[in-house]
Structure formats: structure tokens, C-alpha cells
């Protein structure tokens, strides 16, 4: 019973939390979403869940770009025709609807990373070798000559870098792919972000190929704990709802049955409700406890 109560409270909290927010959160997107080089044009688009008259774009520790519209819009675009170093950074947007002074919460941040083609590309090497069997630990090392940096490991076909790491002491970062599977086969490259320029990137460097041949998988493959959590919460909410439904149906049915029994008691002559009340509430003559 206790887990059921916790579930009910959680369900109630989820519903309450989703209603508490008056103005829903906007979302910010980058176009193009990545691979923007210094000097390229880029557009930040703030998507508004409500028609809004005023929209602001903030750069963390940098500029504020306000935008007022004659007409209410469901999106606002902020375009940089030719990007500058100072425009690389983390952005958020926010809006206000015209009929109220209330301002929305800020969107989740979006990072504008600019590639500076003047940074020499990163070198890369792979260990132990290009062809390995399932379950092998593969390490990929990335290095550059003169920059202390944060290195990022990219896999062709993935839009986001798959790992990131600060160079350890020297100018090298070592990424380990533990217990590789055939899904890890592919082409890998590195880029890096120099110290003090967290939103400036080197171009992608040379590539290494990894081919993983399938062999019987090692036991204990890692499960997705986040997926499990979602399944648990959804399952819990469903169970709580079903439980409530069953309770309601049970009470309705038993109320109905009691009524049917009262109305149609077999063998007994039909009684008027007054007669029944008389029988229930008037004590028998020998019962002293009623007097
Ligand atoms: C891979 O690395 C992990 C963690 O360091 C280690 O426990 C495991 O034995 C390694 N596997 C192989 C096949 O070397």
C-alpha cells in the first residue's frame, strides 16, 4: 500500500508542477546547428509557445539582444551575418506577451561554437588496432602541438561529440571505449577547444577507422537505467490509476448489490422502507443495553 501512496503523491505533484508555470518555457535553436566557422552567418531562433510581443536573447556574460515586434509572433530570429569571436558563447532567450507584464522563464541554453580554421587540426591514433573483436577495450588518443585544450571525440554520423576530456598534463587526451561492440565500428576524429576560448573550436582532424567483429557478447551488458526509471514512473502512475478505477468499480458494484438485495429479498414479502427502519432502530424488549 505504501508504494501506491507514494505513486499517488508523485502523480499529483507532476500534475501540479505542470500547471504551476504560467508562461511556458521557450526553446532556442541554432541554424545551422553545428560546424559554423568564424565569419559564417548563423541564426538563433527562439520558439515561443505563446504569441509574444517582446523577445530577448542573452549571451552569458555578454550582450543582450532585445527584439520588439509590431505583430505578435510564434518565433523570433536573431541573425549574425558574419560571426565574430566575441559572439561565440552560450545563449538563452525569454519573452513577454503583450497583455501582461509577466516575463517567461529563460529557455535552456544553446552553445554557439565557432570553428577557427587557423587552429592546426588535432592528430589521432588508435590502440590496439583497427580490427578488434567484441569486448575489447579500445583507446583513442588525440593531441595537438601548442594548445592546452579540451578535446572532443567525434564519430561520423553522430551529430554530437561522443566524449570530451581535458588534456591530461601535456597536450594529449586519451579516450577509452570499454568493451566495444559492432555498433562502435566507424570513423572517429578529434577536435579541441583551446583553454580560455571554450566556445572556439579547431577544425576536425584526421580520422581513424574502427572495425569491431562480432563475437559472443560478454555477460552483464549495461542496461539503460534512465529508460528503466521512465518505465518505472509511467508504470507506477498507470498502476495507481488502475487501482483507483478498480476501487471505484468495486464500491459501485457493492452499493448496487446491496440495493438490489434490499429491494428484492427472495421469499420475504416486500417491505416498505419505514418498516425496515422500525426494525433496525427499535430495540427488542429484553435488551437492557438500549435503555
Ligand atoms: C577493460 O577495462 C576494464 C576497466 O579498466 C577492465 O575491468 C576490463 O578487464 C578490461 N577488459 C579487457 C578485455 O581488457
Image (tube, helix red, strand yellow):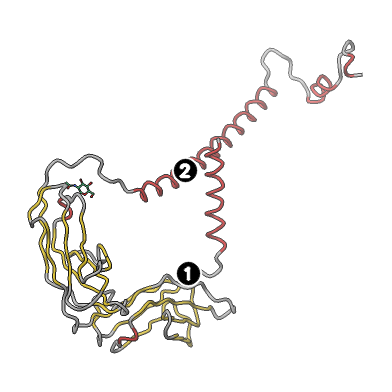
Q: Is residue 267 left or right of residue 150?
A: right
CA gap between label 2 and label 1 equals 27 Å
Q: Which mark is residue 162?
A: none
Quadrant for the C terminus in the image = top right
- Badge 1 marks a residue whose secondary structure is loop
Residue at the spot of label 2: 236
* Residue 43, quarter of picture: bottom left
Residue in the image at 8% along x and 56% along y = 129
| CB under 8 Å between discs 2 and 1 | no
Q: Is residue 217 above or below residue 255?
A: below
Q: Position of residue 261 (x, y in %)?
A: 66, 22
Q: Is the residue at mark 2 in contact range of ligand 1, meaning its CB lies under 8 Å from it?
A: no
Instruction: Name the residue nearer the viewer: 48 or 253.
Output: 48
Q: Is residue 182 above or below residue 258?
A: below
Q: Is residue 113 above or below residue 244?
A: below
Residue situated furthest top in the rendering: 286
Instruction: Name the residue nearer the viewer: 121 or 269.
Output: 121
Q: Is the residue at mark 1 in contact range of ligand 1, meaning its CB lies under 8 Å from it?
A: no
Sequence-earlier tag: 2 or 1: 1
Quadrant for the N terminus in the image = top right
Residue at the spot of label 1: 25
Q: Is residue 141 left or right of residue 164?
A: left
* Residue 100, quarter of picture: bottom right
Amino acid at each position: 500500500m505504501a508504494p501506491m501512496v507514494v505513486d499517488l503523491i508523485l502523480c499529483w505533484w507532476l500534475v501540479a508542477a505542470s500547471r504551476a508555470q504560467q508562461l511556458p518555457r521557450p526553446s532556442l535553436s541554432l541554424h545551422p546547428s553545428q560546424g559554423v566557422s568564424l565569419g559564417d552567418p548563423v541564426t538563433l531562433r527562439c520558439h515561443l509557445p505563446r504569441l509574444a510581443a517582446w523577445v530577448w536573447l542573452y549571451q552569458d556574460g555578454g550582450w543582450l539582444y532585445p527584439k520588439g515586434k509590431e505583430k505578435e509572433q510564434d518565433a523570433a530570429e536573431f541573425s549574425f551575418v558574419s560571426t565574430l569571436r566575441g559572439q561565440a558563447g552560450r545563449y538563452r532567450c525569454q519573452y513577454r506577451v503583450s497583455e501582461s507584464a509577466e516575463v517567461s522563464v529563460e529557455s535552456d541554453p544553446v552553445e554557439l561554437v565557432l570553428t577557427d580554421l587557423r587552429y592546426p587540426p588535432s592528430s589521432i591514433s588508435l590502440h590496439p588496432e583497427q580490427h578488434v573483436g567484441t569486448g575489447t577495450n579500445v583507446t583513442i588518443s588525440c593531441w595537438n602541438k601548442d594548445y592546452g585544450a579540451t578535446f572532443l571525440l567525434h564519430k561520423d554520423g553522430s551529430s554530437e561529440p561522443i566524449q570530451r576530456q581535458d588534456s591530461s598534463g601535456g597536450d594529449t587526451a586519451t579516450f577509452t571505449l570499454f568493451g566495444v561492440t559492432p555498433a562502435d565500428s566507424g570513423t572517429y576524429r578529434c577536435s579541441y577547444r583551446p583553454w580560455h576560448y571554450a566556445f572556439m573550436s579547431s577544425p576536425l582532424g584526421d580520422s581513424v577507422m574502427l572495425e569491431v567483429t562480432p563475437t559472443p557478447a560478454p555477460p552483464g551488458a549495461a542496461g539503460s537505467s534512465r529508460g528503466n526509471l521512465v518505465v518505472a514512473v509511467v508504470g507506477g502512475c498507470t498502476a495507481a490509476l488502475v487501482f483507483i478505477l478498480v476501487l471505484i468499480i468495486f464500491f459501485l458494484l457493492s452499493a448496487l448489490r446491496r440495493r438490489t438485495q434490499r429491494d428484492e429479498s427472495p421469499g420475504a414479502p416486500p417491505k416498505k422502507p419505514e418498516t425496515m427502519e422500525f426494525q433496525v432502530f427499535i430495540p427488542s424488549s429484553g435488551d437492557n443495553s438500549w435503555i
